[in-house]
Amino acid sequence: MTTPPARELSRGAQRVVADLQAQARRLQVARKLPETGAVPMFLIREVQQAFEAFLTTSGETIKDVSRRMGKGFSPSTLSTWRNFTSDAGADYKGDLDGHTRAINRMMEAYAQQMAAPKGPGWVETEAARLIMTAIKQTVRLQAIGVITSDAGRGKTLTLKAAAKFYGSAIYLRVRHGCHTATGLARELAWTLRLKNARTVLDIQHAIEDALRDTGRPLFLDEMHQARPDALELVRDIHDACGIPIVLTGTRRLSEAATSDELFFGQLGSRIAMSLDLNDHIRGKDGTPSRPLHTIKDLRELFASDEVRFTDDGMTALANLANLEGFGGLRLCKQVVVAATVARGYIDAKLVMAVLKELHGKLGVAHRIEPAMRRQEVKVA
């Protein structure tokens, strides 16, 4: 039985913080340039080389960088700077030093964003990494992406984390009242702070005018609640604006989006990235071949001086997390929050006792415990 004292966890947390602070102090990608005066030509060449490497490793295009940097850095300006080979700075049409410094800062800011924590409550579990990868691929392709799973897999937290990473992104949760095309259009217009649009068509035109050619990612959460006309609105916005759109929800979303009966392939043909987390871990026989959430994931999720587990307690929690249709990580968090009123370590017996208090003895005995016994995948 492993029972690490709280002090060791605290020291580990201190090391992580110290490492992050050290990363923040040192340059990740950019070059060290003189604070004042002209930038020496050999350093300009180094920044150009770093920029080439940046484009290759990040997957960003010149057009992406132009959007990221804004006014004064059109694709043609960036391409001119990128391809400048003369040793005489006077031959450059524009502010060579200013452009070099700005591009250098942009690359460093990008690297710092990648290294930074992605938001409160977000932990980079295997499921979160899969979701984030799908989001990034959708944004890179400027397409529509659909991400589905049962409840409690971290879709919402990861989508919000991605919205922080892409600073210009728009996050919108489809709640009651905006599951129709009219409701979704009004909610999106409110999010974008658009005014003076009365009819639904006016609202749609205003949204398209605001988003056209901006490259701003649109993240729509809980889209399994959307009706077919709302999904058609999403398709229209994508076609008119050329922006990447990520939709998340339960499997019902994927079934609706790819339905030939509803859309005759018009929406499905625009989906360039589709990820079903539950199907991702299934083998050829249709049963899970590996856990979606590992013990390592759960330890990171509950890495706190105030929450400590025995080995069997953590295994019980991981088994619970991997049950489909019971709430996943959300159910685990509810159990842990309730269990922390007890002093000492959380063991398997306490996990099951709390579960019975939350969901009733009969509910656990008839539904959850049989599902845990049927679960064949090892979580260790």
Image: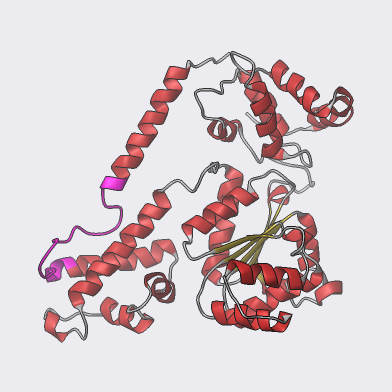
Query: In the picture provided, is 78 more to the left or to the right than 44?
Result: right
Which residue sits at x=65%, y=77%? 237
Query: In the picture provided, is 107 more to the left or to the right than 187?
Result: left
> Is 295 drawn above or below residue 342 in the view shown?
below
Which residue sits at x=52%, y=70%? 216
- Is the stretch drawn in magenta largely helix, strand or loop? loop
> Is 210 drawn above or below residue 52 in the view shown?
below
Which quadrant would residue 10 be assigned to in this image?
A: top left
> Is 142 drawn above or below residue 19 in the view shown?
below
Q: Position of residue 42 (x, y in %)?
A: 14, 68
Q: Is residue 33 magenta?
A: yes
Q: Position of residue 100 (x, y in %)?
A: 23, 71
Query: Does residue 201 show up?
Result: yes
Q: Please state the extent of the stretch shown in magenta in the rendering.
A: 24-43
Position of the C terminus by quadrant: top right
Q: Is residue 364 magenta?
A: no
Q: Position of residue 155 (x, y in %)?
A: 64, 50
Q: Nearer the viewer, residue 199 or 28?
A: 199
> Is 372 drawn above or below residue 200 in the view shown?
above
Position of the N terminus by quadrant: top right
